[in-house]
Amino acid sequence: MKKFLLALILVFALAWPCFSAENTEDKSSDYVTDLQKAISSDIGKLRESINKELESIKLGSADIAARIAEIAILTEKSSDDMAAWGYNDEQKELHTRVLSELSVAYAAYSALVQSANSNNQENKTEDKDADSLGTVKSPDINMSDSLRQEIIKVSRGFDVQLFSLQSKLDKLKIDLADATNLQKKLKEAQEGGEGLELPRTHVLQLEEARVNVALTTLQVRTLRKGFDLNVAEFKRLRGRLEAMQDKLIFPQELLDANLEKLQTRITELMTELNDARKSLGSANSSLVRARANLGSADIMPLTNASAIYLSRSARVTYWEHMVSLLDYEIAINREIQQVWRERFKLFHDTASGEEIWKLGDSAKIRIQELNRELEGIRTMEDTILHQIEARQGQANAEGITSMIQQEILRSIENQRKIITEIYDRYESLIPTAVFYQQRLQSEANDNISAIRIAEKVSSFSQETIMNFLNTELWQGEGYSVTVGKLIIAILVFLSSFFLSSWGSHWIKRRMLRRVKSSITAANAVQRIVFYILWVAFALIALNILEIPLTAFAFMGGAIAVGLGFGMQNIFNNLISGFIVIFSRPFKVNDMIEVSGISGMVDDIGSRSTTIRTYDGLDVILPNRYFLENSVTNWTRTDLKKREILQVGVSYDSDSRKVEKLLNEIVNEHSKVLKDPAPFVIFKNFGNDALEFEVYYWFELKSSSGLKISSDLRHHIAAVFNKEGINIPYPQRDIHIINDDANKLTLDKDNADSDSKPESGEIKNV
């Protein structure tokens, strides 16, 4: 296993550096030789166990055919045999399955033997063809590029083959263990031990295990042979490439042919682009009509109109991607045309030194850009695959009509075409562009010579330069400053920043590793050491200039006055910084809040502290600010934070069921902590709804409260919708009093008042 891990590491070292821009020597032979030795060693360790298991089983072609026929007969009469043996239903099922698997194992082994023999004949024919190729007398640069691309292709196959070999070796170990275990149990049964309950069936299982050992062994040998052929092909291609390097030609006719070929392709692409733009216009028109038919309705839930709209939208997206691809491919082909022109100049040594420098740098930058673009394409491909998965879920949902399902399937088909017809072209096109840029960078680096480097130096002679460096700028008592001394002092002073930073960081790392001190204390020591080293280098620079420190004595009074007034705030923040560092109200990576500013402490400096907010902004606060204001440290004792999620449901909802559903939802979320356990409170009878509150905790370091609450709300909305629980809108009840009825009431009251009874009389109404 260790050797295979080493082999995998070597593969990645092999795949690119062997033909990179900086390495012209072939150092790959040693790598592939080590890989072959590692593989042989791992196979050799299992050889003795394999031979021991296979010595009792015949694996000749005639033997295998005969055994397959015997198993067929056993299968035909297995029902009668198992009845005679008194097998129950479970035992019968096991015996039947073992016979079937044994037959399949023999058939697979026989097929693999025949395939291996056929491949051997083909490989011999290919070897003869390869040997007959000979050496090309006048190889051109196109042949060299083709060979390099073949080498890249072969090299990339190494890691796949190694993984396959490792997988088969692991399976071989499992098969050997199964065979050994069955053999041991059968032997115990024969010697009168407990053994196995079904010796006839388990004998067949042992035979199956041994056939599997033979089958996996043959697969390992086949893979090993394929790997060896790949290595041989790699070495052959490298040999041919080396043989033609000194004989390469690149005439003007070949350049013109390459440019013409690319121009023809550009013309074809422009025609294809015009057709794609027409198709995009037609698709947009269809989308506009679909949107008009949809009206003001929402896309979800799916209806016939919304499904048609989604299908048309997917088609528009396909043609938009196609137009972008064709534009990009035209630009790449024009870029490759320019690369060929530049390579022609480099090959014939007509480029200036300045041009070579620029070509090498621009090619390097372009390679990085292309690789980033390829990563972006793969990311977009993953996004579309997720969208396809979601669409398939919609198509398979219950209650979907056949028309809606048909439109969803059309949408899925257009999304798949984006991957198969567009993104696959990107993944073929971009590596080709990368290859040509790499060749340009490599050839530019090969053409940078001492003569061309000298072109970047001033045309002044050495004597003129030395006279210039010795020019005296000013002098004082006992010292003089020349241009040369000043340049050296400036270089020392500038390099002091790098050296001081390196030295202080080295001490910081030692403190963190050896002393196990906190990051905050290490940062404080680092800054003190930095300033000490920086002052030391400044003194060295003054010594190079031979300027005594007494020359600055007259500045002492002015500096003291300046420190008293101008640097008051600076010293205040410095002292506050050391108080913060040593009192440790918070440390680096703590999450704090101060005066409405929340975020993670990114750095505690000597003068200021940097807080990275949750919006990704860096807020720099003076250290005195933390002593003058209250600071909330969310992670001082632990990293847990509680959140409250408020939910309202309609008054006709079952409150117990709502509480149960909310508990299930919050407990199922992977980011919600189980300790402390979340809980749900029925808070209040609100004006418009029954009000519940969900209390839960999460880890600040690994989770986002906003993301968790958003996920919970999505889940709650889906579950409530499924369970028929409504989340109500704000409601108001309005009571309207009828004016006629009101008037009628008043008239009646007046009539009653006219017939008001005398005192002491009672009148029935």
Image (spheres, rainbow, N blue to C red):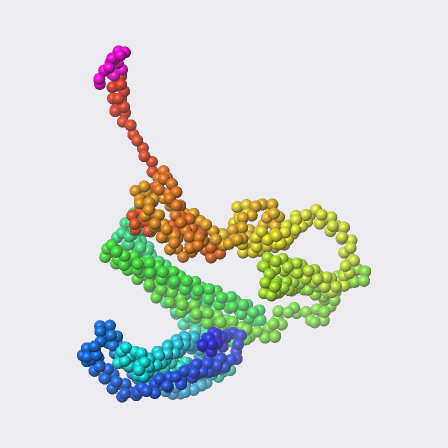
Residue drawn at x 70%, y 71% as measured from the top left: 462
At horizontal 22% and vertical 72% (from top left) the residue drawn is: 89
In the image, residue 566 above or below residue 755: below
Quarter of the picture holding the C terminus: top left
The picture places residue 133, in percent across and down from the top left corner, at 41, 86
Q: Nearer the viewer, residue 22 or 539?
A: 539
Q: Nearer the viewer, residue 340 or 716?
A: 716
Residue extending farthest to the right is 477
Prevailing secondary structure class for the magenta stretch in the rendered image:
loop
Could you tell whether 362 is left or right of 546 in the image? left
In the rendered image, the quadrant that contains the N terminus is bottom left
Answer left or right for 340 relative to 419. Answer: right
Taking depth in this image into account, of 258 and 155 the one nearest to the observer is 155
Q: Is residue 219 visible?
A: no
User: Residue 369, relative to residue 643: is it above or below?
Assistant: below
x, y (%) of residue 472? 76, 63
In the figure, residue 128 lies in which quadrant? bottom left
Stretch in magenta? 752-765
Residue 456 magenta:
no
Q: Residue at x 61, y 64 (%)?
A: 515
Q: At 26% across and 52% down in the image, what residue appears?
A: 304
